[in-house]
Every structure is written in C-alpha cells, then in structure tokens.
Amino acid sequence: GPQAWARRSKGFRKLPKEFESEFKKEAERIRKKSSKDPPMQAKIELPEPKALATASTSAESPAAEAATDTEVIEEPS
C-alpha cells in the first residue's frame, strides 16, 4: 500500500511536516490508480507534490533533497 511506497521513497522521513499530508494524499491517489494498472505500472514511486517542487530551491533543504532522491517515473495528471 501507500505506506510501503512511502518508506521506499528516500528522503520521505526527512520531509518537513507541512509536506507529509500532501505526500499521503498523492500516495492514496496512486494506490487507487495503480489497482487498475498492470503489475509493472503499479510499482510507481511517489510523485513529488507540486507544493514540494515550488517550496524550496535550496539543495541543502530536506524538501529539495527528497525531490532529488525520489525518482519520479510518472507525472500525475
């Protein structure tokens, strides 16, 4: 489920609190979507929330580190 994906996403635990709910919402959205996808498509990493992408430009910040550590395979529509 989404919790397992979250744990596999490097940097997830280092995210600032304000981003956690955003990640959980994205994870839930992907879980519902992936249940209808083929097995290979179901192994999608958590996409980075839009807020995360715009909230920080500093490479030293937890948000930016999580963004670079997490491989986004598919952009949510």
Image (cartoon, rainbow, N blue to C red):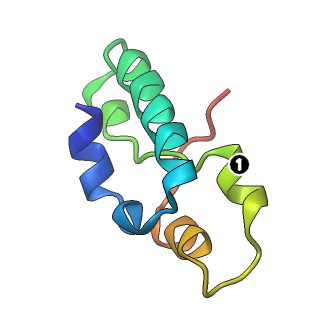
What x and y, as percent, mark residue 51?
71, 48
Left or right relative to 39: residue 30: right
Q: Nearer the viewer, residue 27 or 18?
A: 18
Residue underneath mark 1:
51
Q: Of residues 44 and 16, which is closer to you in this image?
A: 16
> Dot 1: what SS?
helix
Q: Is residue 53 above or below residue 23?
A: below
The answer to whether residue 37 is seen in the rendering is no
Q: Residues within 10 Å of mark 1 (few under 14, many from 20)?
A: few
Q: Which residue lies at the image location 46% right of the left edge and 72% below the top edge? A: 69
x, y percent for residue 39: 25, 28
Give coordinates of residue 3: x percent, y percent.
Answer: 25, 40
Choose between 41 and 63: the one closer to the eye: 63
Q: Image quadrant of residue 43? A: top left
Q: Residue at x 50, y 33 (%)?
A: 26
The type of residue carrying mark 1 is Ala
Quadrant (top left/top right/bottom left/bottom right) for the C terminus: top right
